[in-house]
Amino acid sequence: MKQIFSKILSFLLALFVLFSTFSFTVEKHYCGDFLVDVSFTGETDACGMSVDKTTTTIKASCCKDEIHKVEGQTQLQVNKVDKITFEKEQFLTAFVISYRDLFITNKSNKYFYSNFSPPDLHQDYQVLYQSFLI
């Protein structure tokens, strides 16, 4: 079970690194206040209401395009430990000792009440008081 969990976690972390370096662009085409087209791969399709540039009158276009760019990381940071100081060494020692102590099981060989038998009851008190656990 531990190996399966470790493989799943390493796969998810690899995907996380992959998607953190991935960049993409989302283009949206609005006609008035209505969203007409969304594109993740290229340019959006026009709604057919574009203004011709050959006309002599100047009209304002009701269409607008929005482009959202999501930039990924271009370079991953690699942290190196150049020098371990005395404070870092104390912290690591304390951390390792306290972490190791979490997994020590306390095995006690003392069995209290091993030859103990419950007292004899002359009456059944649950039935007498009508007190039952549900």
Image: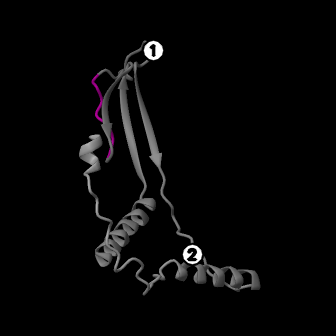
Residue to which mark 1 is pinned: 58
Q: Nearer the viewer, residue 3 or 21?
A: 3
Residue to which mark 2 is pinned: 78
**Residue 134 visible, this angle:** no
Q: Quadrant of residue 55?
A: top left
Q: Nearer the viewer, residue 58 or 121?
A: 121
Question: On screen, 82 above or below 132?
Answer: below
Residue found at the far right of this picture = 86
Q: Quadrant of residue 34?
A: top left
What stretch of residues is rendered in magenta? 42-48
Question: Which residue is painted at 39% across and 77% down in the image?
Answer: 113
Name the kind of residue labelled 1 in the image: Ile
Bin the neighbour count of mark 1 within 10 Å (Cα to Cα): few under 14, some 14-19, many 20 and up. few
Question: Which residue is painted at 37% across and 34% down in the image?
Answer: 28
Name the kind of residue labelled 2 in the image: Val
Question: Which residue is painted at 38% across and 18% down in the image?
Answer: 32
